[in-house]
Image: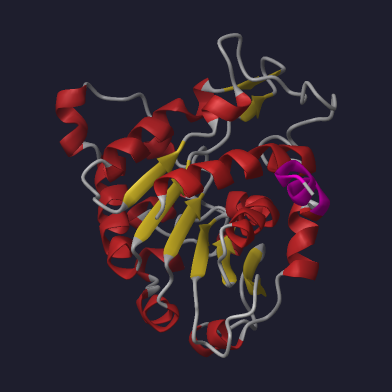
Amino acid sequence: MTLDDKISKNIAMTYEANDTLCKKDEIIETFYTLKDEPLHQWRCSVILASSNNNTFKKEAVVLGNSYAAAQFSGIYQALKLLGYTKAYLIARSGCLPHGGELNKEYSDANYGCNAWITNSFDEFLIAVKPEMLIISARYTMFKHLMDPLPSTDLYAKDFAIKELRNGIAKLSNFSRTLLFVSPNADFDFSHIKYVYETTHTSEVRLTEAIKDCSNCLFFNTTELFCDNNGCPLYDKKTQLAILRDQSHLSTIGVEMLTKPLFNFMSLKIT
């Protein structure tokens, strides 16, 4: 079976895959209260391979918002192919695990993002000791991330860059590798097209925030989904939509993400 066959066989509906593949986890429940939580939240894990009675353990934690949840069925498959034994998913729609005060900007109280300003992943990450943290998030809901970019000499004073840098510095203490998946472009209803411009400023701020992080990697999805002519709405091979809604990847979009992500991790992570 080819790598393409292995990937396509295991990609399920993006969010729905989490209900069947990703299960309640004893370690997660030790550190997080699962009852009476805000809407649109995922806290679960999937066993990828036998850990031989814990003599060999290679685990990853996927953090983020709805983008992490939508992409998890592909991310976990890439991890499985790389020999990881377990993957955890900790995600809440509209929130940034590394965003600090930026979480105040998401106004819908149902998502409870304010709690993530002071939320600590420390005890959970100390217990799990993940080989890798993968952070995938949508940034277009956060005003300061979407503001016009200042001149490069003023990046050090940019509020959003500082908040991201501080959050990333804290997370970097808990894993050998932090892998940031850049946000895929959003669909712009005003122009009826899938546009990179909507995510460009946040992507620049993210890359600036991680540039001094020695154990941070950046995986650029723009190179996957866009070209010199823009960002096509449909996969050329199947003619199926890349997005399932305004911004989240469809099943085919996640499948397009998985092999390049696997290849990137194979090359960059030893």
Residue positioned 68% across, 41% down in the render: 248
| Residue 244 appears anywhere in the view | no
Instruction: Please state, as top left, top right, bottom left or bottom right, where the C terminus lies in the image.
Output: bottom left
Q: Which residues are magenta?
A: 2-9
Determine if the magenta segment contains residue 225: no
Residue positioned 52% across, 48% down in the render: 137
Q: Position of residue 34 (x, y in %)?
A: 62, 81
Q: Nearer the viewer, residue 89 or 79?
A: 79
Q: Position of residue 13 (x, y in %)?
A: 81, 52
Determine if the magenta segment contains residue 6: yes
Q: Nearer the viewer, residue 82 or 206?
A: 82
Q: For this view, does 5 lie left or right of residue 137?
A: right
The colour scheme of the drawn protein is secondary structure
Report the magenta stretch's main SS.
helix
Residue 19 is drawn in which quadrant? bottom right
Q: For this view, does 126 lie left or right of residue 211?
A: right
Q: For this view, does 253 lie left or right of residue 183?
A: right
Residue 235 is drawn in which quadrant? top right
Q: Residue furthest front?
A: 1
